[in-house]
Image (cartoon, rainbow, N blue to C red):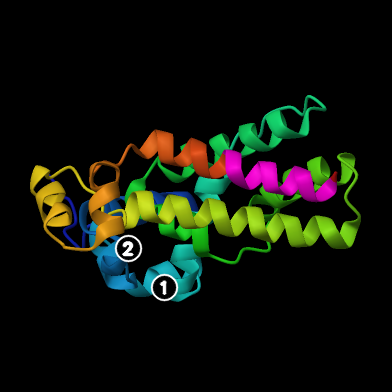
Amino acid sequence: MTEPRRGRPRTPLLSRESIVTATLRVIDADGVAAVGMRSVARALGVDAKSLYNHVDGKDGLLDAVAEQLLGGLVLPEPTGDPRHDLRAIARAFRDRALAHPGAAPLVLTRQLSSLEGLAPVDAVLAVLLAAGASPDEAVHLLRMLLATLIGTLLREVSAAPAFGGDDGARHEVLRGSGLSAVVAAAPHLAAFDREAEFEYTVDLAITAVLDRIG
């Protein structure tokens, strides 16, 4: 009876999708800073060099993750009500960004020229143009809205809110600061409702945009 040939274990089939999935596993476990060709290759059980057939280094990995997450963004159908439509786009963007909190900074900060990266931009511009903004003004308003949305989401997923937190000791620290305005606002500074903060910020930004157009 012929013995089966022994040799090196078969390398699992690689694809861009499997690489992105492995990268997300690394991010979910250890954060974006842990992403690299070697760490992702280890997660897949392959040699790091084999990844270069599918992605162009670490930046390619990060772009691929951002593109996949944005590709899953389900943009709402426009209703013709600019306030409703802009809020719906913002909520959809937030939902997608929070699908993998550790990867949210990639969705929020990577500059993507792909269809996935441009689709949300197109959706917002379409609402602004339909509301009466000129193309030039629509771009300015788009950038303001995106800056506001990205800022509030990065604060939500990546950092403690300014003077906020769930620790009751924070309230005491604020009350004992000796700063009159901080003391007066201490109960509110110590509390942080992520959903309420998001809604307040988005509503304020949209109001400013529509007042500018109007």
Q: Which residue is mark 1?
A: 58
Residue 72 showing in the rendered view: no
Q: Earlier in the sequence, mark 2 or mark 1?
A: 2
Q: Position of residue 34 (x, y in %)?
A: 26, 67
* Disc 1 secondary structure class: helix
Which residue is drawn at the image coordinates 36% and 49% (left, top)?
156
Mark carried by residue 14: none
Task: Give the magenta part as a residue range.
Answer: 203-213
Is residue 192 toward the left or the right of residue 128 in the image?
A: left
The amino acid type found where label 2 is placed reads Val
Which residue is drawn at the image coordinates 36% and 39% (left, top)?
194
Q: Is the stretch drawn in magenta largely helix, strand or loop?
A: helix
On whether residue 25 falls in the magenta region, the answer is: no
Where does the C terminus fall, quadrant-wise?
Answer: top right
The amino acid type found where label 1 is placed reads Lys
Badge 1 density bin: few <14, some 14–19, many ≥20, Cα 10 Å: some
Q: Nearer the viewer, residue 47 or 99?
A: 99
Which residue is drawn at the image coordinates 23% and 53% (left, top)?
183
Where does the N terminus fall, quadrant-wise?
Answer: top left
Q: Quick check: 98 above or below 22?
A: above
Q: Position of residue 83 (x, y in %)?
A: 71, 33
On whether residue 205 falls in the magenta region, the answer is: yes
Q: Quick check: 49 above or below 120?
A: below
Q: Quick check: 106 above or below 97?
A: below
Which residue is drawn at the image coordinates 50% and 36% (left, top)?
199
Residue 56 showing in the rendered view: yes
* Disc 2 secondary structure class: helix
Is residue 82 toward the left or the right of residue 12 in the image?
A: right
Mark carried by residue 32: 2
Q: Nearer the viewer, residue 187 or 67?
A: 187
Is residue 206 toward the left or the right of residue 29 in the image?
A: right
